[in-house]
Amino acid sequence: MTVWIAIFWGAFSSAALFLGQALAEPMRTRTRATGLVMGFGAGTLLSAIAYQLVPTEALDNGLILAGGLSTGALVYFFADRLLDGRGAATRQNILPEAAGGSGLAMFLGALLDGVPEAFVLGASLSLGGAISIAFLAAVFVSNIPQGVAGTVSMRAAGYTNLHVAAMWGGLTLACGAIAGVGFSVASSLSDGGLFVEAFAAGALLMMLADSMIPEAYQHGGKTVGLLTVAGYLAATALAAI
């Protein structure tokens, strides 16, 4: 397995942002439906954290696991606060009237959300030798509502479809590169990549709890809980195949 395969899959999973952009216009007034899809995507990512990033055997190395989870969560927390203060807070908001902030801030905020997912894809390829269909599907599905929300926010802020597409294109390339970094880092570590996966799990869980799940609930209501469980079950079933 080479680093180029990791780069390809990292970019492929992020390309779902373009699908989100294509769906943004018809979904603009259907915020409930977008919230439900976002809840389903959150469930798939929760399953990936539970079964792939923090598997049962990882519990035998409690200190490394706790250190990785805590570090990943803290890094995401402070980076997110820094970017929110510069206008990236609305990057996952589905409502057009909530738009604000600069294009660069929104791009960096979306990149921050995509870093843990892309990093894990690359690291898992290095450690497992094959792509996890369950995790790939989880990332792909979760990126669709993020593409919708980001596009709606950017368009309401005055950016053209071409500018939005350019942002998603840059983000896709960046996530491919991050997946390559994840592959290389995991290949060089002596602990079998446990800290790397725990770090990514902490950052990913922080993103879900801080923005994706609250945003889904705000627009989808209590039904989001059912869709989150459905997403969790779907990803678990894929992992068992």
Image (cartoon, rainbow, N blue to C red):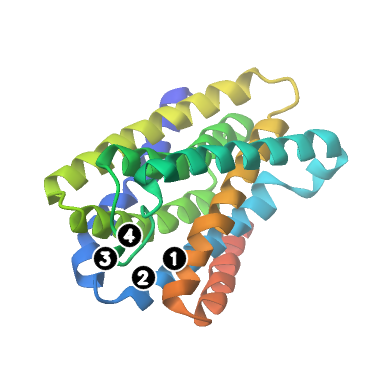
Tell which circle, 2 or 4, labels the residue nearer the N-terminal end: 2
Name above or below for residue 130 compared with residue 26. Answer: above
- Which is more foreground, mark 4 or mark 1? 4
Which residue in the structure is indicated by mark 2?
34
Q: Marks 1 and 2, how far apart in space?
A: 6 Å
- Count of numbered labels shown in the rendering: 4
The reply to whether callout 2 and callout 3 are in contact (CB within 8 Å) is: no
Where's residue 162, x and y in %? 12, 45
Q: Residue furthest front?
A: 85
The image's mark for residue 97 is 3
The reply to whether callout 4 and callout 1 are in contact (CB within 8 Å) is: yes
The residue lying at 27 percent from left, 42 percent from top is 102
Which residue in the structure is indicated by mark 4?
149
The reply to whether callout 4 and callout 3 are in contact (CB within 8 Å) is: no
Which residue in the structure is indicated by mark 1?
38
Characterize the local packing of mark 1: few (<14), some (14-19) or many (20 or more) Cα atoms within 10 angstroms.
many
Looking at numbered disc 4 in the image, what kind of residue is underneath it? Answer: Ala
Looking at numbered disc 2 in the image, what kind of residue is underneath it? Answer: Thr
Looking at numbered disc 3 in the image, what kind of residue is underneath it? Answer: Glu
Q: Nearer the viewer, residue 223 or 2?
A: 223
The reply to whether callout 2 and callout 4 are in contact (CB within 8 Å) is: yes
Where's residue 4, x and y in %? 41, 25
The reply to whether callout 1 and callout 2 are in contact (CB within 8 Å) is: yes
Q: Secondary structure at mark 4?
A: helix
Where's residue 128, x and y in %? 62, 36
Relative to residue 75, is residue 139 drawn left or right? Answer: left
- Which is more foreground, mark 2 or mark 3? 3
Looking at numbered disc 1 in the image, what kind of residue is underneath it? Answer: Met
Tell which circle, 2 or 3, labels the residue nearer the N-terminal end: 2
Relative to residue 179, is residue 163 drawn left or right? Answer: left
The residue lying at 68 percent from left, 53 percent from top is 51
- Which is more foreground, mark 4 or mark 3? 3
